[in-house]
Image (cartoon, rainbow, N blue to C red):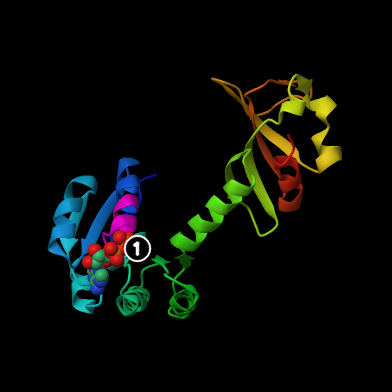
Amino acid sequence: MVKTYAVIGLGRFGVSLAARLFQEGQEVLGVDVNEERVEDAQSVVTHAVIADSTDPEALKSIGIRNFDTVIVAIGNDIQASILTVLLLKEAGVKKVIAKALNKPHGQVLDKVGADWIIFPERDMGERVAHMLLSPNVLNFIELSKEYSVEEMKVPESMTSKTLRELDLRAKYNLSVIAIRHAKSINISPSPDETIEAGDVLVVIGENKDLEKFANLQ
Ligand code: ADP
């Protein structure tokens, strides 16, 4: 389904986000006070305009309240970021996503009504640390503080065995929800499926159990 997005602040983060949404067929308006940034972004979004998002009139003239989602990707100017979120919520924008530089910034964004606050540097740092500590983990999604889905390389000791033999549910309290072979992916693996070297398992479970499993050789 095509949705309309406005991305305010066309720095590295804002442009990557806007360009990706546009590549996926979404309607994306890029907004920045800086003319050069707007020109550079012109070719990677549906439309890009010069506007100062701390000016209520400027927001009104771009029809900001008609967008399904507005992302505030203003970088270092914390004051501008906070004021922008406040004005967007006052204008009636339903979903406002804002990038926070640090915890206090995030707390204020929450107070002024941001619906979703992201901490790109903090989250990426944690992600990289997690992947360094568990070299078998290729990718992961945190479902909650305790539960995740992880994509991991099969430990050598487990190759050429079936899921039934491995018995990961009983031994590690984990469920295998998919197996990726060289070229195909099986999204409903049967207990008799044999795990081959080079396969990737998509596993769901508690983080502490996933960690134990990820450190097996
Ligand atoms: P990044 O770390 O993602 O590269 P930057 O701080 O470089 O972030 O980019 C933030 C962008 O937000 C800049 O292009 C800047 O011009 C823009 N910006 C800052 N304040 C406003 C504002 N009030 N209205 C619109 N854009 C703004």
Q: Is residue 37 found left or right of 92 in the rendered image?
A: left
Q: In x, y percent, where is residue 157? A: 77, 27
Residue annotated with mark 1? 70
Q: Quadrant of ligand 1?
A: bottom left
From this viewpoint, is residue 63 visible? no
Q: Is residue 187 found left or right of 54 in the rendered image?
A: right
User: Is residue 104 positioned above or below 203 on the image?
Assistant: below
Residue drawn at the location 68% of the way across and 28% of the way down? 188
Determine the residue located farthest toward the right in the rendered image: 170
Q: In x, y percent, where is residue 3? A: 35, 51
User: Is residue 101 positioned above or below 4 on the image?
Assistant: below
Q: Is residue 17 found left or right of 105 in the rendered image?
A: left
Q: In x, y percent, where is residue 60? A: 22, 72
Q: Is residue 64 found left or right of 123 in the rendered image?
A: left
> Residue 42 colored magenta?
no
Residue drawn at the location 47% of the way across and 68% of the way down? 115
The magenta-colored residue range is 8-16
**In which image quadrant can residue 98 be found?**
bottom left
Q: Nearer the viewer, residue 129 or 206?
A: 129
